[in-house]
Amino acid sequence: MTGSTQAVERIRAQSAVQPKTALVLGSGLGGVVDAVCDGIAISYSDLPGFPVSTVTGHSGTLVTGTISGTPVAVLSGRSHYYEHGRADAMRPVLETLKALGVDTVILTNSAGSVRADMTPGSVMLITDHINFSGLNPLIGEPSDARFVSMTAAYDPDLAARARAAAETEVLHLHEGVYAWFPGPSFETPAEIRAARVLGADAVGMSTVPEVILARFFGIRVLAFSVITNMAAGMTGADLSHTETKEMAPVGGAKLTSLLKRLLTDIVT
Ligand code: HPA
């Protein structure tokens, strides 16, 4: 039996919910879990292959239940490349979600803004990404399926629904390109200037491997950044993980109301 089959069996043994939508929550965005009704929580340590996170602010729990009546699997905690040097650490998670019947994943993260008009507390719909790391979670995958198209990796239909939900919620939803830097050190001001010139709107240390893996497994992707800080060199301020964790709930509250609205009509 594969790890993902075992993980699916464990989830099914504990929860009758059959989610088609999964949410992955970034640092400090765990508050979304409070929106889950009748949730059953399973620790990643009980799910074969699931990564046990070392990042403060990331709990490592899968919760299944409903948000706005829609069955969901909510993953609090993700594995980052900078924790261990493996870009494919989230592969068992995406594989398990696929085997569970999930066809849509909503990825969230905390990010630094590269744009003066997008200030901390903002929410950004990710419309595309730039992989500045040179890494890829599909390196070593032997099948031809590794040649994944990334042309419409961020599903245009889901993005349109997110815009509509934001309008209903009277929420200003920024849009832009997320650039993945592997971390864990923050970027230098020169790297941020380079990222801006090359077309980035926000920078962060996650999400891109999950987008690639989700597309590999044929799962649709919708993704949001919560802006926790202006990127390095944009203000006189220094950057810190403490600031990221402190600021995440501000945009996180906006994102939660957007997600609740979105989940009323996201099921296919
Ligand atoms: N850079 C990289 N990752 C981040 C940042 C940042 O400025 N803010 C939150 N995550």
Image: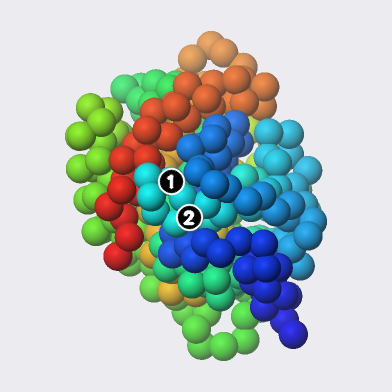
Pointer 1: residues within 10 angstroms few (<14), some, or many (20+)?
A: many
Q: How many marks?
A: 2
What residue lies at 72% left-to-right and 75% top-to-bottom? 6
Q: Quadrant of the N terminus?
A: bottom right
What residue lies at 39% left-to-right and 53% top-to-bottom? 70
Q: Is residue 152 above or below residue 39?
A: below
Pointer 2: residues within 10 angstroms few (<14), some, or many (20+)?
A: many
Assess mark 1: CB under 8 A from ligand 1?
Answer: no
* Location of residue 229 in the rendering, given as x and y in whole percent from the top left corner: 51, 23
* Location of residue 160 in the rendering, given as x and y in whole percent from the top left corner: 22, 51
Q: Is residue 152 above or below residue 173?
A: below
Visible in this render: residue 98? yes
Q: Say which label, 1 or 2, has the lower sequence index.
A: 1
* Location of residue 26 in the rendering, given as x and y in whole percent from the top left corner: 57, 41
In the displayed orientation, state which residue is furthest to the top: 236
Does dot 2 land on a helix, a strand or a loop? Answer: strand
Disc number for residue 67? 1
Q: Are marks 1 and 2 in contact (CB under 8 Å)?
A: yes
Residue under circle 2?
72
Q: Find residue 141 and report its image quarter.
A: bottom right
Does dot 1 land on a helix, a strand or a loop? Answer: strand
**Residue 238 relative to residue 113: left or right:** right
* Location of residue 118 in the rendering, given as x and y in whole percent from the top left corner: 35, 25
What residue lies at 56% left-to-right and 54% top-to-bottom? 64
Q: Is residue 118 above or below residue 192?
A: above
Q: CA distance from mark 1 to mark 2?
A: 7 Å
In the displayed orientation, state which residue is furthest to the bottom: 143
Q: Nearer the viewer, residue 245 or 65?
A: 65
Question: Tag 2: residue type?
Answer: Val
Q: Is residue 78 above or below residue 250?
A: below
Question: Tag 1: residue type?
Answer: Ile
**Residue 161 relative to residue 223: left or right:** left
